[in-house]
Every structure is written in structure tokens, then in C-alpha cells.
Image (cartoon, helix red, strand yellow):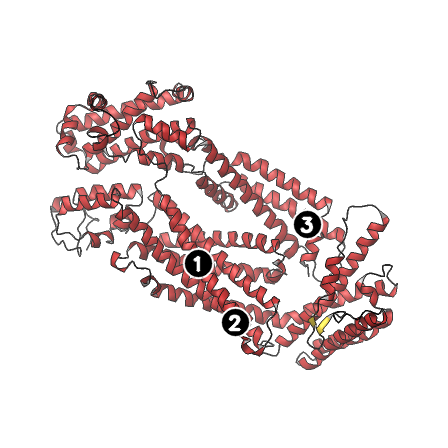
């Protein structure tokens, strides 16, 4: 078995140099790879081919690239740890030389670097390419790529036309008149007069005025107007490709003006088609402005100053700021489940439940179960929220089985990979990796646990998101959130799966572990015999207490134990007796040595309870106080000390394996060996799975609904705008609260409550409401309206 001590032995100059070289290759590769786009053309329009560096502010780009490099470095480190620990060590030979361990580690370090480089070089739609692509997409989101541009463009094209054109308190009347005159020259008097008659109306005319106000601003930028011009911006506007883009937008503006102002032509055009053309024009103009400003602004304050100069002082570069609060609150609920699980872990220990003494080892295993569950659900939630939102932003999401299965499969796999990598790094940091991944079988069980729990969590997470979008405001209460039948069902299923997986794995361990541990003990003992028989040179070494004569009774007991395991596996008591005999003989030798040397210390024994093989503190304290020196030294004395340290490692492996074998044989009794083992294997992991899964479900649905209602409640938000449109189109008898959670098939079965959170869905919803193309059956309004405007496939029953 490759213990954590083995891994520490790999930290010599050669393995460290190999790791650093691989890390350097990863960093150099990642710095260039990060500047490759991960977004599609539809999300950023004509600027999809621009490198990410041009689509955000410099400070944000540097931070995102740092996150990308750190994530790849973490993945590289995790693979370098997992490989030698799990796969490359020959567990039938515990007496491997240090040279073979180092060579194995070096091989995995080189393989990990090669894997990550090949992953990044693969196409983004390949199996390997998806791993690196997801990491790069996440880092781009951290850097607001292209979020800095797309969010700013969204803010620009959603300002209030009335404020800019009719009553802007930040400028005087003369400046306001200049604005009106410039816009009149661009779109004509008729469109402005029509808007002034009804400033609250949102139709094609208002959308066209908004797009042309943006185009007027872009025109000022390219014409280098005073107060706007600066050297960096002038350089960009002089570039040939930017000039060509501006001329193309000019032609688009003229064509749209012709369609709107030509009598009879507007009626012949489909209203949806014309509105879509205007929105596309506004998107491209706003994106052009956002790209130019992002490439010239040094930081957020400089960007805000430039927006103020252009006449958009209230433009916000990030309209989803409360999304961070929503994510944090869900994570807090998941952590609360971990806290409750921690209380349940400590309660039996405080009350001496089952009449047994609880040790630090059982406490550690319980904490590892809590940590693993927390990682699974936190990562699963973040991956699911990110994946689903990305599809909603691209108008590619539908509340259908196809979308559910696609997202659930990809999100569960990604969550499992991220959890395994994160758990490997965290457990290695605290020297606990050997408790969950000490051989190939345990590692496979760990992977299965993460994958199954993540898959179940992802499936129910999609259900929670759907329920949140359909949750009436009257049911949005904190206390009522805990009465969640779906979360209870999810928690029961998660607890059942964890209990079954643990029991299956435990039964496998019960049937195979005794012989595996016995083989390791015999290998260690065979390696120790020639060392002790040749009389160790270091009298301070802990194994020097033993003499060749002390080995004979231990050898006889081991031989008898081997015969019992092979021929009489059911004779548990006889097997335990032989192990206890070995522990008693070792304890007696150490205690005699302590008395003969005049040391009356009661701790001079290897086992606190040799009959049950409960390990003592002597061995661990000795090893801590006698650490091995650097292995790279050529001094003969130092090298001898290194050899002594390696021999002590063999002895410690032999001694620590005895209680493991004792516990493993006791487990074959069928009752788990003891009540504490049953609690450790069955009760506590099941309780942890239930508690954290339930808190995940409650928090996910409640805080998602809270986040959605935030937009509906804002005085200047899209929810209030939707209310105004509904009342204007359908009359006051329409129940707005029921309409908010009403499924609309033409929007992929999204509800208006969720649609107003996403720009493109919101634009489609507003357009259909104004044309009365939605029949709000069940919302207190049973009037069908103009049947000629109700298109097939849009009417809902």
C-alpha cells in the first residue's frame, strides 16, 4: 500500500524539478491559450473573432488569466498526486526502493503535463477539449469576457428614451434641444412626434429611436467630437476594419429608416421580423460602443467617466450583481447542512453513545464524509447554475426532457471531475488522502460516490430551478421553504444511495481486506528480518529494540495466522488471538527495554491495548522527532541516516498494519465488528447525505425564486415594465401575479418571472404581450382578444 509517507519521500530534487518543469510548461501554454475565444458569434455579434483581451478591461483580463492558470495548475497537481498514489505502485511489494517511487512520480508528472497540453490542443467539441474549454470558459466569466462587453452593451440599449430625449436633469434645456435636433436629422420629425404623444409605449418606433440614439453616439465617437475624443479611442476609430464596420452600420440604419418611413411597407413586413431587425441593429451598435470603450478604459472608474461624457451616466457594467448574493445564499444553506451534520457527529461522542470510546480516527472519518458531501453539492450547484444560465443567455434552453438530459449529463460529469480534483488537493494538504483513496478499488468507489451523488443532485437541481420559476409570490416565505416535498424526496434518495454504496464497498473490503493486509504485513516483515538480524548500526532507531530472537515468535504467529486465513477463514477468534499475541510480544519487548534503561515512562509501548491492537503514541512521536534529512546529500553519514529512516518506515508500516488487520478480521463477524463501525459505515454517512441534500434543495429553490422576484420587484426593473405592458394590452382585470408564473410554450415553457431575467427572452416576451399574442387562460382574464393576432403554436390552454 502506498501511504502518504511514501508521497512525502518523493520530494527530492529530481521529482521536484520534473514537477516544476511541467508546471512551467502549463503556465506558458495557459497564458497564450487564455486569449482564445470561448463564446459563439451570436453572443457577441460581429466581434466574435476578437481575442478576449479586447473584450474586457485590462485589470479584469489579468485577474481572469490568473484564475485560469491557477485552475490548470491545480488540475496538474491533482493528477500528479493521484497517479503515483493510486495506480503506479505495486501493492504486492511494499518494499519498493525510493528510486522506483521517484521514477513513478516523475512519469506521472510528465504524463499530467502532456495530458493537459493535449487537452487544450484538442478541438473544443472533443472529449479531451471539453475539459480545458470548461476551465477557460469559467475563467473568461471571471474576467467578464465577454460579460464586460455584453453587459455594458445591454445597459446601453435598455436606457429610457424619454429621459434622454425629453427630461434629462443632468443637462440644461439648450443641450437637450441640441440632442433632439441631432436625432431629428437622423430619423425625421414624424418618429419623434409619435413618441412624444405616448412616451410610455414600447413598440417598433421606440425601439428604433433607442437604436438611433446609440448610433448617434457612435457617430460622435467616429467623428472625434470634442469632449469624447482621446488618443487611444482615435487610434481605434482610424483602423480600417473599424471604419468598415461603421459604414456597414450606416447602411443598416438607412435601410431600417426606409422600411419604417415608407407608407404601406411597414404593414407588408412581419411585425416580428421588423422588430427583430431593429433589435439586431441596436445590439450591433451597442456592442461596437462597448468594445471601443472597453479597449480604451483603464479601469471601472475610467469607464464610468467615459459613459458620463457620452450621456449615459446610469449605465451599469454588470446588471446581474445580485446573482452573487443568490449564489452565496445557496452555498450558505449547503454549509448550514454541513454544520448540522457536524453537530450530529459530535453528539454521540459527547454522550458516549453505544457505550464505546470515540477516537480521533472516527472523528476524522466523519469530518471527511461531511467535507466530501459539501464539495459535491457546492460544485454541483455552481456548475448547474452556470451551464443552464449559459443556455438561457443564448436562447437555447427549453423546459423539456431533451434539455434536462443534456445539461444533467454534462453537469454531473463536470461536477464529479471538479470534486475529485478539489478533494485530492484538500485531503493531500491535510494528509488525509489515504483515508479515501489508498488503492485502486477505494479510488473507484470514491469516483462512483461523487458521480452518483452529483448526478442525482443535478437532476433534482434542474427540478428546483423549474419550481422556483413557477413559485407564486404568496408561497415565497423563509419558513415555508423548509416544507419542500421535492427536497425531502431528494434527501431520502441521496441517503439511500450513499448507504447502499457504502455497504457494498464495505462488504467488498470485509471479504478482501484481511488477505491483502496480511500480504503487506508479510512483505514488511520479510524486509525487516535481514535488517534486524544484521544488527542495525543506529542504536537510536526504533526498530533497534528488537533482536533476532524476538522475531521467531512473531514469525510463528504470522505463519499460523496465514494458515488460518487460507484454510479456516471462519475462525475469527483464533485469528484475532494470533494478532493480539504479536502485539503483546512487541509491547513486552519495548516495556522491558524501557525498564532496563531506567526509564519509567508509562508510554514506552507500541499499543495502548495490545489485545485490541489499539496503537499507542510512542511510534508516531518518535518518527516526528526523527525526521529524515534531505535525500539529495552525498555525505555518507547523511545517507546512512536516510537508510535508517527508510527502515523505520518499514517498521512503522508493519506496526500500523496490525490494528488494520485486527479491525478487518473483526468486521467479518457480520455485525461490523462493533457498534461504532456500524455508525461509521451506515448511520452517519446516511445522515450526512440526507441533511446536506435537503439543505441544498431548500436553499436552491427558495433563493432562486428570491433572485427572480428581485427583478420583478424593482421599481425601474423589467417586472414593472411587464406589468405596465400587460395592463395596457389586456386591461386591469388581468391578474399580474398569476401571469408571472404562467408557462409560455413559445418561450420554451419559461415563465415570465424567469424570462425577464434574460434579455432575449424578455424582448420576445414584451413583443408578444404588446401584440396580444399570448392567451392568459387561468390568469383572471378569459377574453381571447383579436383572433387574427393569435398565431398557431403560441396560444396556451
Residue 52 position in % (x across, y down): 45, 33
Q: Are marks 3 and 1 in contact (CB under 8 Å)?
A: no
Q: Earlier in the sequence, mark 2 or mark 1?
A: 1
Q: Which residue is mark 1?
A: 334
Query: Few, some or many C-alpha atoms within 10 Å of disc 1 (few <14, some 14-19, many ≥20)?
Result: many
Q: Which mark is residue 515?
A: none
Nearer to us: label 3 or label 1: 1
Q: Earlier in the sequence, mark 3 or mark 2?
A: 3
Q: Disc 3 designates what residue?
A: 105
Name the quadrant containing residue 612: bottom right
Decide if residue 615 is on the left or right side of residue 600.
Answer: left
Q: Say which of 547 and 560 sits in front.
A: 547
Mark 3 → mark 1, Cα distance in angstroms: 36 Å
Q: Quadrant of the C terminus?
A: bottom left
Alpha-carbon span between mark 2 and mark 1: 22 Å
* Image quarter of the N terminus: bottom right
Viewer-side label of 3, 2: 2
Q: In the displayed structure, would residue 66 be above or below residue 796? A: above
Compare residues 772 and 621 and report the one nearer the observer: 621
Q: Is residue 387 visible?
A: no
Task: Find residue 185 and report its image quarter.
Answer: top left
The residue singled out by tag 2 in the image is 682
Is residue 295 toward the left or the right of residue 506 in the image?
Answer: left
* Rendering quarter of residue 150: top left
Q: Is residue 556 above or below residue 259?
A: below
Residue drawn at (49%, 58%), measured in percent from left and top? 374
Q: CA distance from mark 3 to mark 2?
A: 36 Å
Q: Earlier in the sequence, mark 3 or mark 1?
A: 3
Amino acid at each position: 500500500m502506498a501511504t502518504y509517507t511514501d508521497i512525502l519521500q518523493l520530494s527530492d530534487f529530481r521529482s521536484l524539478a520534473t514537477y516544476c518543469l511541467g508546471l512551467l510548461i502549463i503556465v506558458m501554454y495557459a497564458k497564450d491559450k487564455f486569449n482564445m475565444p470561448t463564446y459563439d458569434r451570436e453572443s457577441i455579434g460581429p466581434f466574435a473573432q476578437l481575442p478576449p483581451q479586447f473584450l474586457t478591461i485590462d485589470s479584469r483580463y489579468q485577474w481572469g488569466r490568473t484564475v485560469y492558470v491557477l485552475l490548470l495548475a491545480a488540475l496538474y497537481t491533482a493528477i500528479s498526486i493521484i497517479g503515483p498514489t493510486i495506480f503506479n505502485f505495486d501493492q504486492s511489494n511494499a518494499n519498493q526502493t525510493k528510486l522506483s517511487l521517484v521514477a513513478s512520480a516523475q512519469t506521472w508528472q510528465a504524463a499530467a503535463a502532456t495530458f493537459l497540453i493535449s487537452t487544450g490542443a484538442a478541438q473544443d467539441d472533443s472529449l479531451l477539449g471539453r475539459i480545458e474549454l470548461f476551465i477557460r470558459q469559467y475563467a473568461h466569466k471571471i474576467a467578464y469576457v465577454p460579460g464586460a462587453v455584453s453587459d455594458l452593451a445591454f445597459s446601453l440599449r435598455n436606457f429610457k428614451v424619454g429621459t434622454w430625449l425629453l427630461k434629462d436633469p443632468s443637462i440644461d434645456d439648450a443641450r437637450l434641444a441640441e440632442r433632439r435636433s441631432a436625432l431629428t436629422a437622423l430619423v425625421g420629425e414624424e418618429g419623434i412626434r409619435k413618441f412624444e404623444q405616448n412616451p410610455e409605449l414600447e413598440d417598433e418606433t421606440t425601439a428604433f429611436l433607442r437604436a438611433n440614439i446609440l448610433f448617434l453616439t457612435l457617430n460622435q465617437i467616429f467623428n472625434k467630437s470634442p469632449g469624447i475624443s482621446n488618443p487611444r479611442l482615435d487610434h481605434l476609430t482610424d483602423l480600417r476594419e473599424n471604419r468598415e464596420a461603421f459604414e456597414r452600420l450606416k447602411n443598416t440604419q438607412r435601410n431600417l429608416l426606409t422600411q419604417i418611413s415608407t407608407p404601406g411597407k411597414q404593414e407588408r413586413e412581419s411585425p416580428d421580423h421588423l422588430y427583430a431587425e431593429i433589435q439586431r441593429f441596436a445590439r450591433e451598435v451597442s456592442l461596437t460602443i462597448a468594445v471601443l470603450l472597453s479597449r480604451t478604459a483603464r479601469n471601472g472608474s475610467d469607464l464610468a467617466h467615459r459613459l458620463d461624457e457620452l450621456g449615459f451616466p446610469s449605465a451599469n457594467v454588470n446588471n446581474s450583481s445580485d446573482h452573487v448574493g443568490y449564489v452565496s445564499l445557496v452555498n450558505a444553506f449547503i454549509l448550514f447542512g454541513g454544520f448540522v451534520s457536524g453537530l450530529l457527529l459530535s453528539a454521540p461522542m459527547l454522550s458516549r453513545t453505544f457505550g464505546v470510546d470515540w477516537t480521533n480516527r472516527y472523528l476524522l472519518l466523519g469530518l471527511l464524509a461531511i467535507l466530501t458531501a459539501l464539495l459535491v453539492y457546492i460544485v454541483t450547484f455552481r456548475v448547474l447554475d452556470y451551464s443552464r444560465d449559459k443556455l438561457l443567455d443564448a436562447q437555447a434552453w427549453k423546459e423539456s426532457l431533451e434539455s434536462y438530459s443534456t445539461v444533467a449529463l454534462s453537469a454531473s460529469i463536470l461536477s464529479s471531475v471538479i470534486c475529485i480534483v478539489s478533494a485530492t488537493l484538500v485531503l493531500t494538504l491535510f494528509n488525509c488522502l489515504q483515508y479515501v483513496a489508498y488503492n485502486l478499488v477505494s479510488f473507484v468507489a470514491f469516483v462512483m460516490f461523487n458521480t452518483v451523488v452529483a448526478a442525482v443532485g443535478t437532476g433534482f437541481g434542474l427540478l428546483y430551478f423549474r419550481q422556483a420559476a413557477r413559485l407564486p409570490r404568496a408561497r415565497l416565505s423563509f419558513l415555508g421553504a423548509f416544507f419542500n416535498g421535492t427536497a425531502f424526496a431528494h434527501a431520502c434518495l441521496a441517503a439511500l444511495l450513499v448507504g447502499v454504496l457504502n455497504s457494498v464497498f464495505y462488504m467488498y473490503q470485509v471479504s478482501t481486506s484481511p488477505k491483502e493486509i496480511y500480504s503487506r504485513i508479510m512483505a514488511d516483515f520479510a524486509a525487516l528480518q535481514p535488517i534486524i538480524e544484521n544488527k542495525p548500526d543506529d542504536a537510536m532507531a526504533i526498530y533497534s529494540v528488537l533482536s533476532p530472537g524476538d522475531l521467531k515468535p512473531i514469525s510463528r504467529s504470522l505463519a499460523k495466522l496465514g494458515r488460518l486465513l487460507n484454510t479456516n477463514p471462519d475462525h475469527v477468534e483464533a485469528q484475532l488471538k494470533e494478532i493480539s499475541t504479536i502485539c503483546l510480544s512487541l509491547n513486552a519487548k519495548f516495556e522491558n527495554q524501557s525498564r532496563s534503561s531506567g526509564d519509567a515512562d508509562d508510554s514506552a509501548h507500541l499499543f495502548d491495548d495490545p489485545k485490541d491492537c489499539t496503537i499507542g503514541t510512542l511510534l508516531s512521536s518518535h518518527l516526528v522527532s526523527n525526521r529524515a534529512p534531505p535525500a539529495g546529500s552525498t555525505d555518507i553519514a547523511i545517507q546512512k541516516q536516510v537508510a535508517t529512516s527508510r527502515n523505520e518506515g518499514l517498521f512503522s508500516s508493519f506496526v500500523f498494519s496490525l490494528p488494520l488487520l485486527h479491525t478487518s478480521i473483526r468486521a467479518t463477524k457480520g455485525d461490523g465488528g462493533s457498534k461504532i463501525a456500524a455508525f461509521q459505515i451506515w448511520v452517519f454517512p446516511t445522515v450526512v447525505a440526507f441533511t446536506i441534500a435537503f439543505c441544498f434543495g431548500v436553499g436552491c429553490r427558495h433563493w432562486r425564486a428570491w433572485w427572480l422576484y428581485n427583478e420583478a420587484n424593482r421599481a425601474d426593473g423589467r417586472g414593472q415594465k411587464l406589468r405596465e405592458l400587460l395592463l395596457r394590452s389586456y386591461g386591469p382585470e388581468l391578474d399580474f401575479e398569476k401571469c408571472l408564473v404562467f408557462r409560455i410554450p413559445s418561450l420554451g415553457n419559461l415563465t415570465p418571472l424567469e424570462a425577464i431575467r434574460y434579455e432575449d427572452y424578455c424582448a420576445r416576451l414584451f413583443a408578444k404581450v404588446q401584440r396580444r399574442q399570448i392567451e392568459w387562460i387561468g390568469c383572471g382574464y378569459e377574453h381571447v382578444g383579436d383572433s387574427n393576432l393569435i398565431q398557431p403554436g403560441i396560444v396556451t390552454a
